Image (cartoon, rainbow, N blue to C red):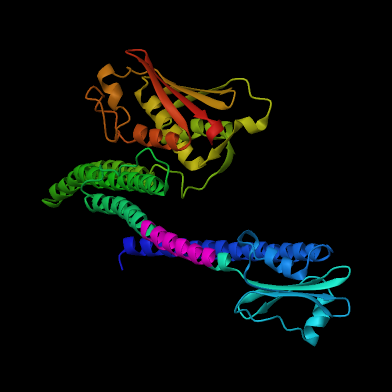
């Protein structure tokens, strides 16, 4: 069974159940109300007759004639009035109506007050006054006719309502299923070759809009993952092929003939440099591939940012004994917690390391200056080099992977991945980088990490 029929059937069944309960309640309460009204009419009629009977000027025959007026008549009426010794005082029966018969059970029940019972299809009432016992029975024609009309009205309303519910439910299910079908059809056209398409979420805030929004978020994450994978494959195939080709070429030349010790040492030194560069390139590519745009899967904990920064001068010395890093710490906050960052210490150090390393490489004296400041709930880090500066046309591309300016000195080695990797890491830690550069004077990297959102 298709989903639209299931929705319609479920909707109609639920409404039908509610309508049945409602109709039964209306019918039962209405019937009870009519019964109570009829009993009140019988009692009022009996009391009126009793009052007239106590009037000495009215004979029983005249009383019977008065009680037969149409305005006061009860259908198939029978009435009997007894004194306290159960002696019949007054009796009246409509034509073709069975007289009331008193038995021992009746005598016992009537002593307790108003006693309602049935005589065939007629309703009957017995009650006591000060000196008399009154019995009256009649047939409620009005109630029977009114309940018959009420049953017809309820049955008609029930089936008309069910028909309307089925029609409305089917139209509603068509709209719902149509929306789901459009979502499914749209998803069929989204593949790894085209992740740019998105579902139309609309402005409503119903469950379908939430579904479309959730699917779009999932597609955004998948698109980012595929782009990361694609970039890694493209970058790896492009960047790894060059150093490998150089290494193989050098080794192939070396095999062609026996060479001197000095030539072999020179060859080994050259291959070692190429392998070292290849090692750095592979590590950078792997680090870049690990960053999927979210913090999920990363080990996060609190650590002091000043302790992290103090590792930079020593580690730069290990890379190159000529590298010099000067640290300047401005006034520390009173609360030690303000110096702590919640994130991945290794990745954040990698970001600072790459920027400081670049600063040392491009400064003529291999020196870089690093300033650390605390402003409200933000951490401000400034990394200054004294190199040639960055050309204006290169600034929009400075954080793209493998981008290197044509004006860079070829003697300065690099993969073009350091700044791209640093930028991605800082984004994961709610940080941002701005660049101030002046040709011939140097470049300043201004880093701000907002702790409010960490």
> Residue 138, how many percent across, how many down?
65, 72
Q: Nearer the viewer, residue 164 or 9?
A: 164
> Residue 270, how many percent across, how many down?
25, 41
> Residue 437, how many percent across, how many down?
36, 16
**Residue farthest along the bottom direction in this orientation:** 104
Quarter of the figure with the C terminus: top right
- Magenta stretch: residue 299 in it? no
Q: What is the magenta segment's predominant secondary structure?
A: helix
Q: Is residue 327 visible?
A: yes
Q: Nearer the viewer, residue 323 or 358?
A: 358
Q: Is residue 323 visible?
A: no
For the point 25% across and 47% down, the residue is 233
- Magenta stretch: residue 155 in it? yes
User: What stretch of residues is rendered in magenta?
Assistant: 145-164
Quarter of the figure with the N terminus: bottom left
> Residue 81, how many percent across, how many down?
79, 74
Image position of 339 with respect to 277: above or below: above
Q: Nearer the viewer, residue 80 or 373?
A: 80
Task: Decide if residue 236 is on the left or right side of residue 120.
Answer: left
Q: Nearer the viewer, residue 110 or 423?
A: 110
Label count reads 0
For the point 37% across and 21% down, the residue is 363
Image position of 10 with respect to 291: above or below: below
């Amino acid at each position: 069974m298709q989903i639209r029929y299931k929705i319609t059937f479920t909707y109609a069944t639920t409404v039908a159940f509610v309508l049945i309960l409602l109709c039964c309640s209306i019918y039962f309460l209405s019937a009870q109300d009519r019964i109570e009204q009829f009993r009140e009419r019988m009692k009022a009629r009996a009391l009126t007759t009793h009052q007239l009977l106590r009037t000495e000027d009215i004979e029983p025959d005249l009383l019977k004639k008065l009680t037969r007026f149409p305005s006061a008549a009860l259908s198939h009426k029978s009435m009997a009035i007894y004194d306290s010794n159960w002696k019949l005082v007054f009796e009246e029966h409509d034509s073709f109506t069975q007289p009331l018969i008193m038995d021992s059970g009746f005598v016992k029940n009537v002593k307790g007050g108003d006693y309602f019972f049935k005589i065939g299809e007629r309703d009957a009432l017995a009650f006591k006054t000060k000196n008399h016992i009154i019995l009256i029975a009649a047939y409620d024609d009005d109630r029977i006719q009114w309940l018959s009309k009420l049953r017809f009205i309820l049955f008609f309303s029930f089936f008309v309502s069910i028909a309307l519910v089925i029609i409305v439910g089917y139209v509603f299910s068509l709209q719902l299923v149509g929306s789901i079908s459009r979502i499914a059809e749209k998803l069929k056209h989204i593949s790894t070759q085209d992740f740019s398409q998105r579902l139309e979420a609309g402005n409503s805030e119903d469950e379908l809009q939430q579904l479309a929004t959730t699917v779009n978020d999932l597609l955004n994450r998948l698109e980012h993952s595929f782009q990361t994978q694609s970039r890694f494959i493209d970058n790896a195939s492009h960047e790894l092929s060059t150093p490998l080709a150089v290494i193989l070429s050098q080794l192939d030349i070396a095999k062609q003939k026996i060479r001197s010790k000095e030539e072999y040492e020179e060859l080994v030194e050259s291959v070692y440099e190429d392998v070292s560069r290849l090692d750095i390139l592979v590590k950078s590519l792997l680090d870049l591939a690990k960053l999927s745009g979210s913090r999920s899967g990363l080990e996060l904990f609190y650590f002091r940012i000043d302790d992290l920064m103090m590792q930079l001068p020593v580690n730069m010395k290990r890379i190159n004994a000529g590298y010099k890093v000067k640290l300047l710490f401005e006034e520390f906050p009173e609360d030690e917690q303000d110096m702590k960052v919640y994130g991945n210490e290794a990745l954040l150090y990698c970001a600072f390391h790459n920027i400081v390393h670049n600063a040392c490489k491009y400064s003529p004296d291999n020196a870089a200056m690093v300033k650390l400041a605390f402003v409200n709930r933000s951490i401000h880090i400034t990394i200054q080099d004294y190199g040639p500066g960055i050309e204006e046309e290169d600034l929009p591309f400075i954080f793209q992977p493998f981008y290197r300016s044509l004006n860079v000195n070829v003697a300065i080695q690099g993969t073009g991945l350091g700044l791209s990797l640093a930028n991605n890491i800082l984004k994961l830690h709610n940080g941002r980088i701005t660049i101030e550069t002046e040709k011939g004077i140097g470049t300043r990297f201004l880093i701000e990490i907002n702790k409010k959102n960490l």
